[in-house]
Amino acid sequence: MYKTFSLYSIILITTLSYSQYKNDFMISDSGTNPIFKFDSNGQIHMVWVNAQKRDQSAQYSAFDSMGNVIYQTRKISSVIRVGNPSLSINKGYIACVWEDRVSLDFTVFSTYIKGKILKNGIDVSSEVLFDDSEIIPNDAYRRRAEIIWHNDSMLFAVWAGKGSRSFSEGYTDIYFHKLKFPPLQKSHPVDTVFNNSWLKVSEDGQTIIRRSSGSGYIVVWVEKDSVGKWKIAGNAYDDSLKSISDKMVFISFDKLEYNYISKPSVIYKKNGNIIVVWEKDTTNYKSNIYFQEFSEQGVPVGVTQKANELLATGGSEVSSDIDSDGNFIIVWEDGTNVIAQRYSLGTTKIGSNFQINKIQTGENIYSCVKLRNRKIYSAWTKFVGISPSVWMNILDFDNPTVVINEESNLPQSFTLTQNYPNPFNPTTMINYALPKAGNVVLKVYDVLGKEVATLVNNYKESGRYFVEFDASKLSSGMYIYKLSSGSFSEVKKMMLLR
């Protein structure tokens, strides 16, 4: 059965003061999923996905500490279809990684992990295929790659999905590959898995950080076992990414309403403990944001805390960062705005939830946050209609409050967003927004135009709606979903991957 969930609440926020270093400003008029980091000189390096219909390539630019452009935006991927770019910085060298989705078609869905190294805004390496698909060709979906510098001449690329070492049918693993530089090249032909790939466990959403001692790493991920038990788990590794501990289960979930746990965000405290942040689904495709402190051995310290005061958007993710004084921040989205909460060194809450973005237009999602010199640097994607763009601002950590003059949080335009996750198996979520009431029809078609499902066909009040599409009875391939209301009509594509 297909279920429709709606948001009827109007959020009114009024504050007394407003302080920031730089108002909301646009990074790119076409883009999504921005990720940025600081180099040792305080310069900001950012990657994102271009969002033009015929160009979804990986983009790069750099800015000074006040957001002024240093290196102009440029395309860094050789293909025009990529996903989830990320980066790591070492002594002015910017290592970039992304999902290469060039092989998407109706019968095969292969994603490759590729990347390159930049310096001073230009390439200093060729584009390199990081996974082992050139040695062992296979139809595999690889995703959510991260890259981290080990030292001046070695890096690690880490990703989740299927690959040459995945033996359990229907389950995913977490892979890594050691890379040498210069020149940028793989150290050996075959990928390595962190976990025991024979186990029937699906793992995804990995985060890799260097241990507080500076020796070795901790990798944290989300997993689901063969009996449907969800966990946030992890392990400690030495400098070669060889396991040096038993698997640590940080959080085990007795029940998930809609089988969604976000990719964990992990940060280090000054005392060597880690803070794990995650989003957990609740009813009606809404979520709560939680965090918990642990020792490096996975022992809980204190109790799990909830960061959000109002429910967050289901199916989204979290971002967090910590400064040199031990203050940290957690950021998430509520469907329209980017919301944040500050904490002191002792995980004590500072003030209340506040809004990152000031401009009250569109949907503001896919946030990335960093703390530096008592400033909050944030980047996010703004959707106005069907056009995503990348925005940024710089707030005062001690007084980040955004003034809103009791404005309605109702949508200003019709919107049909891209389903999430995509590709999916077998369920995905479709969001749409109505600026006015009316009859709404939302249908799904196959690539031949045959209707396969009617998700909505009734009268709806203005507001934002979330629809679950269950394709468990359909075969793999591309599908099209169409939203119609009055004179408005829009279609999007989605991929069912078995």
Image (tube, rainbow, N blue to C red):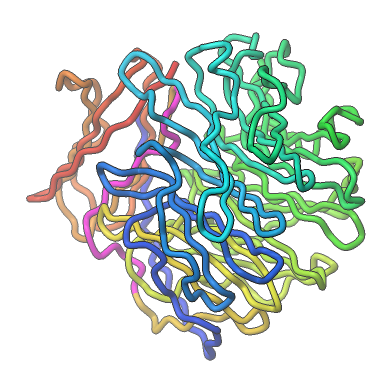
Q: Nearer the viewer, residue 65 or 266?
A: 65
Q: Residue at x 33, y 49 (%)?
A: 51
Residue 466 in the image: state x and y as whole percent. 37, 44
Q: Nearer the viewer, residue 35 or 97?
A: 97
- Against 374, residue 197 (above or below) is above
Give the overall secondary structure of the magenta segment.
loop
Tell me which corner region of the image, top left, top right, bottom left or bottom right, holds residue 204: top right
Q: Is residue 113 left or right of residue 452?
A: right
Q: Is residue 415 magenta?
A: yes
Q: Is residue 386 magenta?
A: no
If the image is split into quadrants, where does the N terminus sit? top left
Residue 305 in the image: state x and y as whole percent. 74, 56
Q: Is residue 249 left or right of residue 310?
A: right
Q: Nearer the viewer, residue 285 or 133?
A: 133
Q: Residue at x 76, y 34 (%)?
A: 233
Q: Which residues are magenta?
A: 408-425
